[in-house]
Image: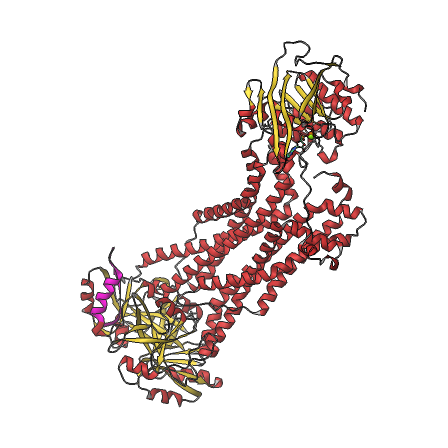
Amino acid sequence: MVTSTSHTPTDGAAEIVFRTEGLSKIYDMGEVQVHALREVDLELYRSELVVLLGASGSGKSTLVNILGGLDTATEGRVFYRDWDLTRADDRELTQYRRRYVGFVFQFYNLIPSLTARENVAIVTEIADDPLSPEEALDLMGLGDRLDSFPSQLSGGQQQRVAIARAIAKQPAVLLCDEPTGSLDSETGVVVLEALERVNRELGTTTMIITHNVVQAEMADRVIRLSDGRISEIALNETKTPARDLTW
Amino acid sequence: MRALNRKLLRDSWRMRGQLLAIVLVVVAGVATYVGMRGVMHTLYESQEQYYTEARFADGFATVRRAPERVADQLREVPGIAAVETRVLAAANLDMPGFDEPVSASIRSVPDGEEARLNRLLIREGRMVEPSRGDEVLVNEVFAEAHDLQEGDTFTATIRGQRQRLTVVGVALSPEVIIQVQPAGLFPDPERFGVLWMSRSALAAASDMDGAFNDVTFSLAPDASLDDVIERVDLLLDRFGGTGAIGRADQTSHAFLEIEFEQLENTSTVLPLIFLLVAAFLLNIVVARLVNLQREQIAMLKAFGYSDYEVGAHYITLVLGVVTAGAIVGTVLGVWIEHLLGQLYLDYFRFPSLEYSFHLPVVLTAFALTAGASLIGVLGSVRRAVRLPPAEAMRPAAPPTFKPTIIERIGLQRFFDQPTRMILRNLERQPVKSVLTVAGMSAACAILVLGLFFTDAMDYLVEAQYEIAQREDLTVTFTEPTSPRALYEIASLQGVTYAEPLRSVPVRLHHEHRTQDTSLDGILPDAYLRRVIDRELRPILIPPEGIVLSDRLAHVLRVAPGDHVRVEVREGARPTRTVPVVALTEQFIGMGAYMDFEALYRLVGEGPALSGAFLMIDDAEAQVLQHRLLDRPQVASVLSQDRVVEAFEETSAETLLVFTFILSLFAGIIAFGVIYNSARITLSERDRELASLRVLGFTRGEISYILIGEIALLTVLAIPFGFVLGSVAAAGVAATLATDLFQIPLVLTRSTFAMAATVVIASAVFSALIVRRRLHTLDLIAVLKTRE
Ligand SMILES: Nc1ncnc2c1ncn2[C@@H]1O[C@H](COP(=O)(O)OP(=O)(O)O)[C@@H](O)[C@H]1O
Ligand SMILES: [Mg+2]
């Protein structure tokens, strides 16, 4: 692992997908102000797999939420390609999320009253050029659990349904907030393998949040946040396949 | 089907118990609205159509005797389109197989030509032949009451002459859509009937050759009724006219109008209550659902569902419930409309009822329900939509508990741990607790409202017929008669006591308001006919001044101390101003009263009686009534028992049906509210309760926590329900009050007890269902799923 001061990835001429300029987020809690992000400058490139590391409370979720159009910054700018998300209104952000972003959450957030297939369909139905729910679930190795309800699936299976849901619309970016956070390491590896495969086969720009340093080994780049600031951006010369990770 | 709709269906199925309870409340509201409004429109349209077809007159006037040429003068009156003179005669009938006396009003039909106004519709048989004094047509209700067929005969006494009459047919008239005896207040077709006879024959029998004693007229378009009446009165005055009246004062029409008014009021107030309750229930259910699905909503938004789509999702659920309720309610409502229509046809004799589907009524019902429900859930849905998606991804902060008031003032040592949990939970969700109490109070209030009518009817009968009017028989004379007649009647066998009756038709004026009524004389030491105050104590009638019924005073806007102008409408027709000296409680009709001597002075004539009140020996009742009717000066005999009976058969009966429906629906509401609130409490707290079970609490102990909460809310709700119900009863009594009939506000202990019992029973029933679910709580499943 090599520390780098430039933001350039390996091949030097990659397309920039996200760019932030002096991004800050302050939660006003009345008496106290919480600085969740402090002047973050960052670029993310097409098709790269980035792992975002940091202690709990360091601002990881806040950053990903702002990139994904779920939250808005207090100061600074965020661009998705040429689109200034900081100027987008609610309706535009909804369109942005609908077209370009796939989310994977720590707690899966599946709809309990819908089957695996329907949980994916709920997203493909509003997408422009989606995979079919069956294809997406097949990709996640769940071709035989199409009609299972979330309560009939294990945690790892549920998270893979959630990934199938996120990738089925063929998003430009996949944002995963601690996708293995509530899984044991064995199941966690299976989920990471799935994400790795999506990144490799569909070329989806992927950002994975974790506070587990081992998982950083599968990334193209590793970004470290501490106390709302980027403390380090590291380029990973030799990626370890997810299957070989243990923690 | 779209996945989102599938979610909706499955969510609904999971909440089917709660949603069904709400659907029932909506059904109740829509059904009452569609049924009552529907029948109102049906009656109204049937009335309009019948009036037009039969040429129902616009004005009516009675005279003592006027020569036929006056008719031509009437035709000249500007604004009058058509005039029909006729002869009316009172008769007493001996109906075969019916022991009691029967009185009749015989009306003439023109000889050899069709009537210009108030045309008869022959239902059976044929028209009477001109000049045949032995042929009559009988009104349909009367024919049915006595099972009269074509060719049946009976004896009638007209002006003292006995005469045999043959029924040649059965008819309907727009003048007697409802047939009520002149002095009576309720239909009694067994003891009173309307008959029609040839004009020349009836004129001959009642000494009216070349003359008439009654006239009806129709108005030209744009004519003013008041102007025409003024001119008609001027013309007829010297022939003993008692003042022309418009349709509004025509008995049958007035009865219909009152019924329409009551239908309109009831069909507004009742459904409104149901709609509010439905809106309230939807509010708590949707608020809960949105809360429960915070993260699902956030996920949908994260994946690009718009605020609009998310809002529409929950609105669809609400509209689904409302639509289901509205459809079932409409079907039920149309059925109720036909049911009520058939009931009404017994009293209101239209040729037929033209039922039609009143789309505007149904649409209004639907719009009102949907509107109320949407307003009810708007807050929750807006909260769902406004939820910032990032916010919702974070697990909700654990609810903040504070020490309860009870703990703060140091009473907690009196309560065990589970009881403290109940109290804390109630304090933590004050809005939900308050709304649940409100819902249960509403159900309790509706029960009080429904039950109150029965008490009110009992009270009314007691006040009116046991305290104020204690006579057994009321005898009326054909015309004001010398007081000697009273002594003759008092001496008849079977009469134990007699009091004089003097009733003068008057028009009362105060400022610009007027009201026609009768002014009755009251004896200072009256025993039979008395006026009473609000506490039902007899009022000592002052030697001067007038006593008005509450309602009449209200209509004229007068209070004791004010003066009213009394225009006497018979005899020398004097007009005098007299002070109002007291008000009297009177539930049926609106009378005016005066000391006997004062009344004579006011009218400006010597003592004359309109009739007599009698107390009689029951054993002699039948014979006595016949003996009375045989006297030429007697026009009618009215039995108090019959009046009470007729009253109970009509008004009381419809009100009791109404009470039953109301109680049933209130039960549905009570159950709907309590069941919903208990189910929601259970689903909110199943994790907590399951954890307690895991920690070793028994089923009994956790049931106590949940059911204790329901019990506490129920106990809180009941007193509020009593207050609310009393206020609602007062409101409904006021809205249903008509000039004919007022409902006393009487609330008894048994009403409150019954209302409380139904609410408690619903609570127990809901608690039992919830307890069963609690006992089958799957501990592992509940603890495994993350809220
Ligand atoms: N809605 C919020 N209101 C107030 N403070 C918040 C809110 N969301 C996050 N924070 C605070 O912002 C900081 C960063 O939070 P977060 O981005 O969730 O960190 P991470 O995901 O790295 O654990 C933390 O101190 C957290 O307490
Ligand atoms: Mg986080």
In the rendered image, residue B704, in percent from the top left (x then y), is placed at: 73, 55
Q: Is residue A16 left or right of residue B55?
A: right
Q: Nearer the viewer, residue B170 or B712?
A: B712
What segment carries the magenta color? B209-236
Q: Is residue B738 above or below residue A3?
A: below
Q: Is residue B376 above or below residue A64?
A: below
Q: Nearer the viewer, residue A99 or A60?
A: A60
Residue that appears at 67% across and 28% down:
A59
In the rendered image, residue B153, in percent from the top left (x then y), is placed at: 38, 74
Q: Nearer the viewer, residue A27 or B274?
A: A27
The image quadrant that residue B156 belongs to is bottom left
- The image shows a total of numbered marks equal to 0
Q: Is residue B387 rendered magenta in the image?
A: no
Residue B596 appears in view: yes
Q: Quadrant of the N terminus of chain B?
A: top right
Q: Quadrant of the C terminus of chain B?
A: top right
Q: Is residue B232 rendered magenta in the image?
A: yes
Residue B316 appears in view: no
Residue that appears at 59% across and 66% down:
B752
Q: Is residue B625 left or right of residue B664?
A: left
The image quadrant that residue B415 belongs to is bottom right
In the rendered image, residue B731, in percent from the top left (x then y), is placed at: 48, 62
* Ligand 1 in which quarter: top right
